[in-house]
Image (tube, rainbow, N blue to C red):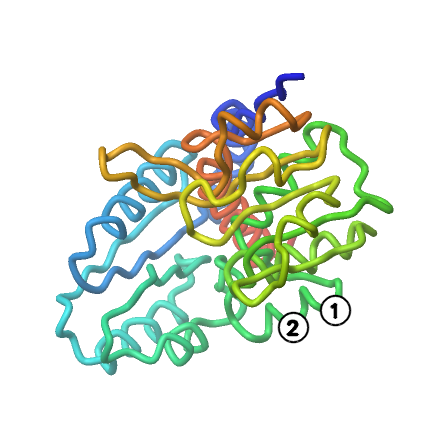
Amino acid sequence: MTAKILDGNALSAELRESLRQRAAELAAQGSKPGLAVILVGENPASQVYVRNKIKACEAVGVHSEKYEFPADTPPEKVLHKIAALNADPKIHGILVQLPLPPQFDEDEVLEAVSAEKDVDGFHAENVGLLAQGNPRFISCTPYGVMEMLSSEGISLRGMEAVIVGRSNIVGKPMALLLIGASATVTVCHSQTRDLAFHTRRADVLVAAVGKAKMITGDMVKPGAVVIDVGINRLPDGKLCGDVDFDSAKEVASLITPVPGGVGPMTITMLLANTIESADRAAGK
């Protein structure tokens, strides 16, 4: 058996066309969606991510503003900018690109963003709403994963779902979403004993740990759906995920590639959250 590839680029393009139409309707009513992105420092990966987000905004008709600060910027200056953006009616979403330089308290910065404009879904209030099953905004990467599963008509009810990774950005919100879909969820991490024992039980396996090719084909249940959230750069410069794609695709029924899998969906769901925020601001 060779797994079917879950093409994030194709699904993302389909969803973005729908988002473009929604953005155009809002703009025609005088409520053009707006996203502000804050970038502190010169981290090359962060610069690429921000550039891709701005480009995606332009493609679907979302107004975007980018604010760049040197790495040695005092936190108070960034917090002041966030406060101004919170009060700006043209801005419906605020994104602070992580990681931040060491002088910043990331939690303090993320909490400074208005919960109503926290399109990344990182604010404690929004995390709490997600935990209650009544989300305002869903973290973009887990949101994208759920859209990919939905696009394949996969019913998660009663399935064994295993997540490798417990980060606030992916692992924890992913677990909450899968629980909400009535899956039975196990979250594994660096202290998990016998990781393969757990991964081999998974009907749906989500790898989000940041370690290149750590999930091999012999760790995958035959016929499982394998979602690879990891993005790692190999010594030769090529990108790969947390899953050893070549061996896992011979065992799984569905699998996401890296690149071209979950990555495009993350940005698409950021756009979806921003447009949803604009909808709410317009009273829809």
Q: Position of residue 25 (x, y in %)?
A: 54, 36
Question: Toward which corner of the image does residue 152 lie, by quadrant?
Answer: top right
Mark 1 is surrounded, within 10 Å at the Cα level, by few (under 14), some (14 to 19) or many (20 or more) other residues, namely few
* Residue 190 location (% of width, % of height): 52, 63
- Could you tell me which secondary element the residue under label 2 belongs to? helix
> Would residue 163 be found to the left or right of residue 41 on screen?
right
Disc 1 target residue: 132
Q: Nearer the viewer, residue 19 or 195?
A: 195
Disc 1 to disc 2: CB gap under 8 Å:
yes
Choose between 239 and 126: the one closer to the eye. Answer: 239
Residue type marked 1? Gln
Element on which disc 1 rests: loop
Q: Which residue is mark 2?
A: 128
C-alpha span from label 1 to label 2: 6 Å
| Residue placed most toward the observer, 185 or 42 | 185
Establish if 35 lies above or below 255: below
Q: Quadrant of the N terminus?
A: top right
Horizontal side of 39 relative to 18 (left or right) equals: left
Residue 213 placement (x, y as % from top left): 45, 40
Q: Residue furthest right?
A: 158
Whether 124 is drawn above or below 166: the answer is: below
The amino acid type, in three-letter code, at marker 2 is Gly
Query: Picture quarter containing residue 218?
Result: top right
Pinpoint residue 107: horizontal percent, then vertical percent: 42, 77
Residue at 60% x, 46% y is: 206
